[in-house]
Image (spheres, rainbow, N blue to C red):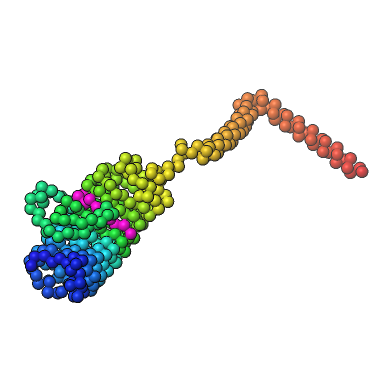
Amino acid sequence: MTHVTADEEEAPLISLVRSIPHIWTSLEHLFYINLWSNRLSGEVPVDLFDLKQLEMINLGENQFSGTIPMNMSRYLEVVILRANQFEGNIPPQLFELPLLFHLDLAHNKLSGSMPACKYNLTHMINYDRYYYAMVYSATNDAIELFTKGQEYYLYDVSPNRRTIDLSANNLSGEVPLELFHLVQVQTLNLSHNNLIGTIPKMIGGMKYMESLDLSNNKFCGEIPQSMALLNFLEVLNLSCNNFDGKIPIGTQLQSFNASSYIGNPKLCGAPLSSCTTKEENPKTAMPSTENEDDDSIRESLYLGMGVGFAVGFWGICGSLFLIRKWRHAYYRFIDGMGDKLYGILMVKLIRFRRN
């Protein structure tokens, strides 16, 4: 046996078991498992992901619970676990699979921060399309994939579609910078989590990005100018975060609807409302100019008074100090005034005593 598939028509048969038989873990040559939407529940056998030849596993749209097994086959290329009840942290081993090109863990109960590891997903860093075109062998079964916000069936699964979808979980903390080194990723969906931090400038290096959804998180800061370099971007959603500043000018970013940016109160610029500046709103700038003029007049008045006092003081005192005749005349004037005042005071005093 090389692959196991159970579609909707076969659901009643597999549903009798309700869980994955542990005997499957002994099928060393099994390379393809597709149990999409079969109402299965319980925990996934620990060794199921560690089958030596396993390349694809699709357990989506079931009711599996527990944690995601940590032991992984190095040959895994497609991992789809969306819409289950998986919880706990994301195993870092998932981001160290060199052949992985499609990872979908959306709509689970995963928590904690994203793994801090090397993100050694070689296929998402250095992708040789000519090599894979020659050596890749796919099955004839359909896998239901979600990308660009749409659902579609993919026959003859191709590594040309490189996707990471971790949306609708309880992930928190900052996104590791290593994730943005995966320059070959085409679809990245981290929406509906509790992620924080800023978008790094290096996101501009992910030049093959076609769909980016970071909505409904707690990202903050400005949108980096480098995002204008994502020329293949067809779907963008940055809504409901804490981004601020002006949306970078670039035909790519301005081509999206305002719905891609709403829910960021401090974000402005096309396609949102224009940013308010002094040049754009002269009425707001006028009071500031008038205040500056008043301050300038007040400073000039104080400066003039100070200069006038200094000139007057040194003009009189300097003259008396330097010109002897003026100094002597001044002293005589002071003495004469003193004598006159003394005489007047004595006359008044005598008259007062007589009365």
Task: Give the percent coordinates (x, y) of residue 64.
Answer: 24, 70
Q: State yes or no: residue 183 in magenta.
A: yes
The quadrant of the rendering that contains the C terminus is: top right
Secondary structure of the magenta portion, mostly? loop
Task: Give the percent coordinates (x, y) of residue 137.
Answer: 9, 56
Q: Which residues are magenta?
A: 182-192
Task: Give the percent coordinates (x, y) of residue 82.
Answer: 25, 63
Q: Within the image, what quadrant is residue 15 found in?
A: bottom left
Question: Which residue is at 34% across, 55% downward?
Answer: 215
Relative to residue 228, is residue 125 depicted above or below?
Answer: below
The answer to whether any part of residue 107 appears in the image is yes
Question: Which residue is at 59% across, 32% downward?
Answer: 304
Task: Give the percent coordinates (x, y) of residue 22.
Answer: 14, 74
Q: Is residue 160 left or right of residue 268?
A: left
The answer to whether any part of residue 110 appears in the image is no
Q: Is residue 241 left or right of residue 72?
A: right
User: 2 and 178: which one is in front?
Assistant: 2
Question: Which residue is at 11% across, 65% downward?
Answer: 3
The quadrant of the rendering that contains the N terminus is: bottom left
